[in-house]
Structure formats: C-alpha cells, structure tokens
Amino acid sequence: MLGKFTDGGGEVELRLDIGKLGIENSRDVFVDVDDTSLLVRAKSDGTLRTLINVKQLFDRIKSSETIWFIDEDQLVVNLKKVEQELKWPDIDESWESLTSGITQLLTGISVHIVGDSTDINEAVAKEIAEGIGYLPVCTSELLESATEKSIDKWLASEGVDSVAEAECVVLESLSRLLLWATPSLLPLVDVLLSMLKRLFLPRSHVRTVVATLGGKQGAASRFDKWQYLHAGFTVWLSVSDASDEASAKEEARRSVSSGNVAYAKADVVVKLGGWDPEYTRAVAQGCLVALKQLTLADKKLAGKKSLYMRLGCRGDWPNIEPPGWDPDSDAPPTNI
C-alpha cells in the first residue's frame, strides 16, 4: 500500500492511497489503534483488506486522540505523539527508523558494549556503529596493535589482571585522550595515544561504539574498572537460558538488582537466547530499542553523561561531585 508519512512535531500523519480500491464511504474503513500499534483495514468489493499493520510504532501515541478521514483518493490517519519533541523517521520501529532516529537521543554520547563474549561484543558493536554512523572501536584490536601480540599470548605471559588494567587505559584514552597509567603501562599509553589521534584526526567530535573484552580479562567484568565505562551508554549483552521473553526480562531484573556481577552496572541489559552471527542485526536492533527507551525515560541522562566526561570521569558516577573535587580526598560528598 503506497502512502506518505510526515512528522509535524506534536503529531504524525500517514496518507494511504486508496483510489484504486474504490472506497468512498468511511463506514468501509476500520482503524484499530492503541498506544503502540496501528491496524488499518478497508472493505473493497466485499473483501476486508489490510491496508497497513504496524505492530510496533516508532514511539507511543495518545490513541484516544487519533483522527482519520478520507481526502479524495487518500485515507489520512493522524496520530498524536506522547513525546512531542521526538522526531519520527518513519511510522514503525524498524532497523532503518531506529538507526536514523536514535542519534537525536544519544546526543553524541558514545556506546559501550559489554558482556562475556568478545566476539559477540565486537559483532554487535560494529553493526550498531555502521547503522548509526558512529566509529566502531574494538579494544582488543587496539591492544593487539599497540603491543604487537595477541590477547591470548598476553594472557599467557602476564595474566588476566594485566590485560584488564591495559583495557582500562584504552577506555580512559577513548573517554578524553588524556592518559594516565602506572609506570609499567606508560609505553602502551604512548602507542595508544598516537594510534587514537590518527584514528580521530578527521573528526571534530568523536562518536564511537566500543566493543570491550569479554570474560575475566575484560575491564567490564570488574567492579573497580567502570570509571571510564560510565562515560558512555553501556549495554550488557547477556546470554540467557530463559525460554521466553517474560522469563528473560525477570532474569535481567534479578541480575541487576542483585549486583553480583559487575556487568549489572550497565545502563541497559539485552538478553540473548544463545548466539548466531546471522542474528547480529536483530541483537543490534534490540540494543537500539533499549537505548531509546532508556533515554526517553530519563531525558537528563545524556547530559549527565556529558558532564561526567567533561569533569574527567573521576569515578563519582552517578552522584557527580562539583568541579575541583578530588577523588582521593576524604571530604564528604556534596554532589551537583
């Protein structure tokens, strides 16, 4: 069904071409709508036809205020948006509309992908980055390029603690390009700084989707290594044994509330019922849906992330202290 979609600010309008269907009476048109879905059907030649079926609108609407009418050869459906400032790229919540619309909510803040599998983190991060036009960054690739050895060899020779500490340095450099590290990591810092400057040189503002290391060697698996991860929106990809969506959501809720794993510090959790590379885009889309819901629920979150980063990622998330606060000070917190 050919039609035209427009966003008019506080409302969106859908025009469907019905001239060839011979529909002239509004009594032959049936519009079923709720806050998140839209179904339009029409009776033509004695047959009830589905003109459009949107199971998930791009965002919520005020369904009770829906207006529809026939304008010559077009059926016009007018929907009132709940979030009036949110620009709808299209009528439905598809991969195309999400990748186009999410950047207005992220406002330039980077995205960090964490979880037990480096391979999954990297695949999903690259898919998201390509979709939204951000720069994909894999900490494993940066570390291996800087040290000229594989992560596996590094683990074998120096252990998981060394790799986790080094990844934390990478995350710091990505958050502000002002590096600090223990003396043993200073050579790595110099190499990383040079690499990152070359990587970001053409860009006036760095927008990244960062894939972190999975497993015990990853900084995200440790409670004390989240200082720089909080500078971006963090998404935890958690493989689940749950048999249905409701069970998966309950499992995610328990994981976050228990705080038993460092990944629970993430801003959102996306549960995976196993892994197949063919479903990378579906997982990436789930991440964007979760980030959209997060940023709409807390419209000040992106600004708070930006402030945290501008103040130097001092480890005071989410209770940000005033400028000049010393994280090593014993003074009582005052918070901004």
Image: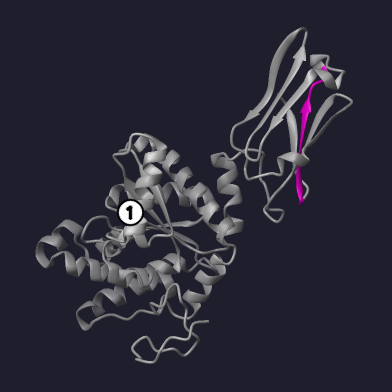
- Residue positioned most to the left: 157
Q: Is residue 259 magenta?
A: no
* Residue sitting nearer the eye, 270 or 101: 270
Q: Which residues are magenta?
A: 9-19
The residue that mark 1 highlights is: 255
Left or right of 243 on screen, residue 24: right
Residue 152: which quarter of the image?
A: bottom left
The location of residue 278, given as percent across then percent down, is 37, 34
Q: Residue at x 28, y 72 (%)?
A: 224
Q: Residue at x 60, y 48 (%)?
A: 100
Q: Is residue 122 visible?
A: no
The location of residue 275, given as percent across then percent down, is 31, 39
- Looking at the rendered structure, the kind of residue marked 1 is Ser
The location of residue 171, given as percent across then percent down, is 35, 68
Q: Quadrant of the N terminus?
A: top right
Q: Is residue 327 above or below residue 3?
A: below
- Residue positioned most to the top: 46
Label 1: state its secondary structure.
helix
Q: Is residue 117 above or below residue 3?
A: below
Q: Residue at x 33, y 54 (%)?
A: 255
